[in-house]
Image: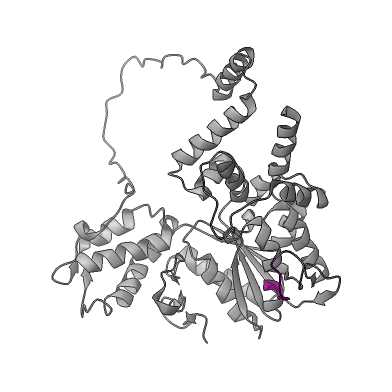
Amino acid sequence: MTLHAFNPVAAEPVLTLPPSEGGVLSIRAKALLFHDPRSVALLEHVERIARSEASVLIIGDTGTGKELIARHLHTRSGRRGPFVAVNCGAFSENLIDAELFGHETGAFTGASQSRAGWFEAANGGTLFLDEIGDLPLSLQVKLLRVLQERQVVRLGSRKPIPLDVRLVAATNVDLRQAVEAQRFRADLYYRLNVAPVTLPPLRERTGDILPLARHFMGVYAPRLGLAHVTLAPETETALVEYLWPGNIRELENVVHFALVICRDGVVRPGDLRLVAPVLAAPARPVAVAEPELPVPPPAIAPERSPYADLEDNVLRLIAGGDRNLFHAVTETVVRTAFQQSNENQVRAARVLGITRNTLRTFLKRYGMLAASPRGGDGHDDEADADDGHDAGITEPGALYGDLERLGA
């Protein structure tokens, strides 16, 4: 089965994903087009590094088409094995170890039979690890060892299995900042960042916006029974000037919705469901007479740091003798960030500077997130602490547990 279509001789090369099986909606960007000069340079860079065996780190905002680039790297690499895509943020810390590296029978409760992990499944091909920044520190150690030794050991086994896998990782966060914050291992970062690929957001490659819009019109118009649909000139202007915070994924949804409600085969600005402000039009220069006596601006007193105010409040709480101070402050910070992010775990974790798995632990601890009935989101604090100890690294959850026991 063809993983994606690519026409290198077309005027506007385009990468596309195959349709979702069973009509299941996908949250991925489904097309990536190379018309803007920045996109053309990006494609040339990808083509140059595709034939190498170097690990690739794809950096880009959500919805910019990171998986499309990863699939194209695999196709151009000449590897005969499969392309396997895994989202590191889709599994709990208790499951991702077995999912990535496999397990033997009886390795843990419920392991009734042995199972190969994703590394073995991608042997001879390419393994794409999306949201690599969500990988727990304890597993970052194991991943680094697999990359260095090119072999994997299943859970419950001591027998190494040789691998021939090219690793392509992707992230929408700055891993250098994560390294500085000790949430991501520096040695793993340098191991992954051999051949970096940076995907600019859609608002920075405006030359791709209208060709992509027309591409999605060609995809959805036949499904809606529309023979011929055009964009009004005002609509084209609105599309180009929009910020596109959701990038290609948002553009696809906007075009799809516009085709559903448009009339007479013309998409007008009112048919576009744009939620973010558009780019401000450049102001025209206006001749202004210079004042004879310019008045210096008033002196502005330096603003007081918010952390200074926070320190003052904490000192007052300490003076009040609150014995539950640590839990109360932590719960307030987590709850405020979670609510401010509209209860979006990825955004809240990014605001707090922690991983999503660590955030989930706090949300469940303070009753803000119900445990999953499947048990996939559940966390065993003691098991998490042991994992961090075995790796020689203290996980945030383990540190929290230590402080809690000292407080008791």
Residue farthest along the right direction in this orientation: 158
Q: Observer-nearest residue: 337 or 286? A: 337
- Residue name at image x 58 percent, y 49 percent: 356
> What residue range appears in magenta?
110-119
Is residue 372 in view from this perspective? yes
Query: Is 367 situated left or right of 243 in this image?
Result: right
- Residue name at image x 59 percent, y 14 percent: 316
Is residue 55 in view from this perspective? no
Query: Is 224 situated left or right of 136 in this image?
Result: left
Q: Name the main secondary structure of what is drawn in magenta.
A: loop
Residue 140 rendering spot, x and y as whole percentages? 73, 57
Q: Observer-nearest residue: 366 or 3? A: 366
Residue 114 lies within the magenta run: yes
Residue 59 rendering spot, x and y as whole percentages? 58, 58
For residue 400, what is the image quadrant? top right
For residue 13, what is the image quadrant? bottom left
Indicate the colouring scheme: one colour
Q: Observer-nearest residue: 126 or 402? A: 402
Residue 250 drawn above or below residue 25: above
Q: Observer-nearest residue: 218 or 374? A: 374
Residue 313 drawn above or below residue 269: above
Residue 20 lies within the magenta run: no
Quarter holding the C terminus is top right
Residue 94 rendering spot, x and y as whole percentages? 67, 58
Residue 96 rendering spot, x and y as whole percentages? 66, 62
- Residue name at image x 86 percent, y 70 percent: 158
